[in-house]
Amino acid sequence: MNPQGHDSTDAAQLRQAFDHTFALPPSLASQAVEDLLMIRVSGDPYAIRLLDINEIVTERKIISVPTVTSDLLGLAGIHGGIVPVFGLSSILGYGPDPVLPRWMILCGKEEPIALAFSDFEGYLRLPTSALHAGESVRAQREQIQYVNQVASTPDGARAVISMPLIMASIRNRIDQHRPTKESSK
């Protein structure tokens, strides 16, 4: 059994420890954070929000198919389904990768699309305050339309590619080339 003096001392120590936590600066864990994948496209650094993708896969065989767009690299078998694979380098205006990209990110739940790229650099968690409107990193290529933020990372600024914007653009292009029900009669 504890003497009565110990309970009040323990309570005072707990109260002091509790109060002390509010005197400290907020930790990264208590801040809003953004999880990012760090990649390179044609040597340029980019980031992709982890929340915008379903999965990252590697080393999948891509089967070429006839296409009306140079962005479509072909089809790949992923999780028992066939997924169209688009080249991120071409979409961003760099032109086709000189070698077949090794990495793919899957986006979209109902009709997934894979975006292929060559260089994966890793994962980074940043406070949301490290992301800013993308005015300072504007290039002359098409990626301007797919970048709406810049991440301030320990290695410098990285344009954050908006997967929803890329997905909407790809789906729009696909819909333009799909035959309508009237034309298939």
Image (cartoon, rainbow, N blue to C red):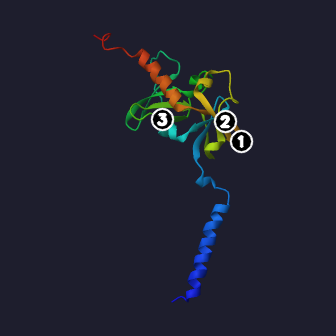
**Is 36 drawn above or below residue 74 in the view shown?**
below
Please tell me how crowded label 3 is: few (under 14), some (14-19), or many (20+) other residues with Cα within 10 Å.
Answer: many
Residue at mark 1 = 155
Residue 148: x, y in percent? 60, 30
Confirm or deny contact between disc 3 and disc 1 (CB under 8 A): no
The mark nearer the N terminus, 2 or 3, is 3
Tell me if I can see residue 166 in this picture: yes
- Examine the image and state in which quarter residue 157 appears: top right
- Look at label 3 and name its amino acid: Leu
Residue 158: x, y in percent? 66, 35
- Examine the image and state in which quarter residue 102 appears: top right
In which quadrant is the C terminus drawn?
top left
Residue at mark 3 = 106
Of 138 and 67, nearer the camera is 138
Mark 3 vs mark 1: in front: 1
Residue located at (67% from left, 62% from top)? 23
Residue 125: x, y in percent? 61, 47
Residue 25: x, y in percent? 67, 57
Confirm or deny contact between disc 2 and disc 3 (CB under 8 A): no
Q: CA distance from mark 1 to mark 2?
A: 9 Å
Of 43 and 26, nearer the camera is 26
Residue at mark 2 = 158
Tell me if I can see residue 58 in this picture: no
- Look at label 2 and name its amino acid: Arg
Of 16 and 178, nearer the camera is 16
Confirm or deny contact between disc 1 and disc 2 (CB under 8 A): yes
**Is 7 drawn above or below residue 84 in the view shown?**
below
- Look at label 1 and name its amino acid: Asp
The mark nearer the N terminus, 3 or 1, is 3
Residue located at (63% from left, 46% from top)? 126
